[in-house]
Image (cartoon, rainbow, N blue to C red):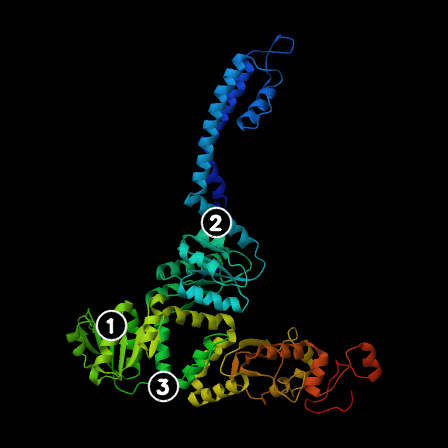
């Protein structure tokens, strides 16, 4: 494991603005200084006359003062005495010289202001200052393409601060268009430069993680490697579609590597065997406001045809074969170790497609890297067999309406798969644990959980949050949790009417390393338990009141109405910090 920390120190990029300004304006400044020096020196040498008509010479200070207001077109007059003809002749020459000098300097300055390198230097300086002043924890996103944009919006809804790097000015400009709740610093830069990562806050004490989301696996590898060397132990999530790159990434620390093609294959297998579990997983991973997805059409058992045996086609084919399904692959290149029927040729050729016997197949996968090809393959396959279960890969966001019009049964958008996976890991760590363990419970359990969520929260997912029953986060429950009689159902009551349950559903209870999925009301609670809830924001606030307010705790757990003032508490003999009665045992009075 990499343990040694590497520090880059102060970056030279932060001073590039000053150096660029001095370098580009060096010649104009030298010209202006030379013109002023010659003009001032000439005025001191040319003799003039005083008010009495006696010869007099102008001093350096008076000459410099005169040239300062003359060259700047202010013009106060001739000092300290009216000029002679020789002095006026010299002044006329210097006036034209200074006009030429100022025109040259102003023109050079305007050119500099329009220079791309100068704009980049200014942006870098402004970006560096903004990042250095951050006082809240933030995530560094490297790559603000479709995945970064989708993920950034969802994380912003959770109140997470972001810093963004990208090589595309168009992507960074999108930060000004996207409606973020807080300012998101963004910089167009070479993300492969470790110093740029340092400037972006990699060494900032408030940086809580790095997301390498570019579409170049080598760049993501370099980002993960730099983060492991500069900040050992800092959480890193990296995108890759290459198993070899994934192996190299894991050589540096313990990054979380997300392969959208591999995850899509896992989703295919889950949907084939446990469609309701997949429905629940998709709903929870979609984030706040997501509508409960409708159950999709399921394919029957039989042979599948896969067009395109690139990285995506290879992952899907391996997952389908692992399920024991018969497979036919169409690709331009032959693979001797395929282990399935192989048709070498262009799938867009009708003769090649006819050779795949689509009329006898149950599933069809259009998995090439070209959206136009995939759309045409889907249309051709459906003409041959309209009942085919169709899966397709969408590569570009602009083509989403075309794929929607085709009514694809299963559409892979790598950016959306990435955004959902990373959101599930960053939003609430317990959610990721729930999603990992949930498929093992089976479809019947998932159907029951969906019914509970629908009964309490409706068909639209409101919010997910984690509750920690530690003494620090739940001070009002410390004594109750130590009695051994604490039950989850007693806690989930409304502070306004304890006969009504809160609109919250517990998804997971974590005690140490032991997780209980979908705990019911009779599950016992202990100190330091962590619980993942789904429900209404009002339920979250109400639960927080019960955990932190002793008076609310008394009513929710014991049914006692305790006066809020200390005087009334003494007069009534009720102390809200007592509460040793077992929950559910009503008290009369108050």
The residue that appears at 48% across and 45% down in the rendered structure is: 12
Q: Which residue is mark 3?
A: 273
Q: Quadrant of residue 165?
A: bottom left
Q: Which residue is mark 1?
A: 376
Q: If the image is split into quadrants, where does the N terminus sit?
A: bottom left
The label number, if any, that marks residue 123 in the structure image? 2
Alpha carbon of mark 3 to alpha carbon of mark 2: how far?
A: 52 Å
Query: Whole-percent x and y of residue 24?
Result: 44, 36
Left or right? Give the position of 212 relative to 535.
Answer: left
Q: Nearer the viewer, mark 1 or mark 2?
A: 1
Q: Nearer the viewer, mark 3 or mark 2?
A: 2
Q: Quadrant of residue 469?
A: bottom right
Work out whether mark 3 precedes mark 2 in sequence or the reverse, and give the earlier one: 2
Picture layout, residue 41 above or below residue 572: above
Work out whether mark 1 precedes mark 2 in sequence or the reverse, and give the earlier one: 2
The residue that appears at 54% across and 17% down in the rendered structure is: 43
**Viewer-side residue, 271 vs 8:** 271
Query: Whole-percent x and y of residue 587?
Result: 75, 90
Q: Counting other residues with Cα less than 10 Å from the Cα at mark 1, is it few (<14), some (14-19), or many (20 or more)?
A: few
Provide the secondary structure element on which disc 3 rests.
helix
**Viewer-side residue, 504 vs 478:** 504
């Amino acid at each position: 494991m990499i343990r040694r920390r590497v520090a880059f120190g102060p970056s030279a990029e932060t001073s590039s603005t000053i150096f660029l300004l001095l370098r580009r304006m060096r010649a104009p400044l030298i010209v202006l200084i030379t013109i002023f020096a010659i003009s001032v020196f000439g005025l001191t040498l040319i003799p003039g006359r005083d008010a009495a008509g006696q010869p007099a010479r102008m001093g350096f200070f008076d000459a410099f003062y005169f040239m300062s207001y003359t060259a700047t077109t202010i013009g106060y007059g001739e000092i300290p005495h009216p000029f002679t003809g020789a002095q006026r002749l010299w002044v006329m020459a210097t006036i034209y010289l200074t006009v030429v000098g100022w025109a040259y300097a102003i023109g050079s300055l305007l050119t500099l202001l329009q220079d791309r390198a100068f704009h980049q230097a200014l942006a870098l300086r402004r970006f560096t200052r903004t990042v250095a002043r951050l006082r809240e924890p933030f995530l560094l996103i490297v790559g603000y393409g479709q995945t970064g944009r989708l993920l950034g919006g969802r994380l912003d809804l959770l109140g997470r601060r972001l810093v963004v790097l990208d090589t595309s000015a168009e992507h960074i400009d999108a930060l000004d268009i996207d409606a973020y709740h807080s300012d998101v610093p963004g910089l167009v830069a070479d993300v492969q430069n470790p110093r740029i990562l340092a400037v972006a806050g990699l060494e900032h004490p408030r940086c809580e993680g790095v997301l390498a989301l570019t579409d170049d696996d080598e760049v993501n590898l370099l980002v993960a490697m730099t983060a492991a060397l500069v900040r050992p132990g800092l959480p890193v999530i990296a995108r890759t579609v290459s198993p070899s790159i994934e192996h190299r990434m894991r050589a540096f620390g313990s990054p979380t590597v997300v392969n959208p093609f591999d995850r899509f294959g896992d989703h295919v297998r889950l949907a084939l065997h446990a469609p309701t579990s997949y429905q629940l997983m998709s709903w929870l991973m979609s984030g706040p406001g997501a509508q409960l997805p409708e159950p999709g059409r399921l394919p029957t058992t039989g042979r599948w045809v896969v067009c395109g045996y690139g990285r995506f086609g290879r992952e899907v084919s391996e997952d389908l074969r692992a399920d024991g399904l018969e497979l036919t692959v169409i690709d331009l290149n032959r693979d001797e170790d395929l282990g399935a029927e192989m048709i070498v040729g262009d799938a867009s050729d009708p003769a090649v497609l006819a050779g795949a016997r689509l009329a006898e197949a149950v599933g069809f996968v259009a998995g090439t890297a070209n959206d136009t090809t995939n759309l045409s393959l889907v249309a051709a396959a459906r003409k041959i067999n309209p009942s085919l279960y169709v899966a397709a890969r969408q590569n570009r966001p602009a083509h989403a309406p075309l794929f929607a019009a085709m009514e694809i049964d299963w559409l892979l958008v790598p950016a959306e798969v990435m955004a959902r996976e990373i959101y599930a890991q960053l939003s609430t760590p317990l959610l990721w644990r729930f999603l990992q363990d949930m498929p093992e419970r089976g479809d019947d359990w998932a159907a029951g959980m969906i019914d509970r969520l629908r009964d309490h929260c409706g068909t639209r997912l409101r919010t997910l949050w984690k509750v920690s029953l530690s003494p620090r986060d739940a001070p009002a429950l410390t004594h109750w949790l130590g009695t051994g009689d604490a039950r989850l159902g007693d806690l989930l009551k409304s502070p306004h009417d304890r006969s009504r349950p809160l609109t919250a559903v517990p998804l997971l209870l974590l005690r140490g390393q032991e997780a209980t999925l979908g705990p019911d009301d009779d599950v016992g609670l202990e100190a330091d338990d962590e619980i993942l809830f789904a429900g209404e924001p009002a339920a979250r606030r109400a639960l927080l009141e019960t955990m932190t307010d002793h008076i609310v705790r008394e009513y929710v757990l014991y049914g006692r109405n305790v006066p809020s003032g200390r005087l009334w508490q003494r007069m009534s003999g009720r102390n809200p910090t007592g509460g040793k009665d077992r929950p559910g045992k009503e008290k009369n009075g108050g």
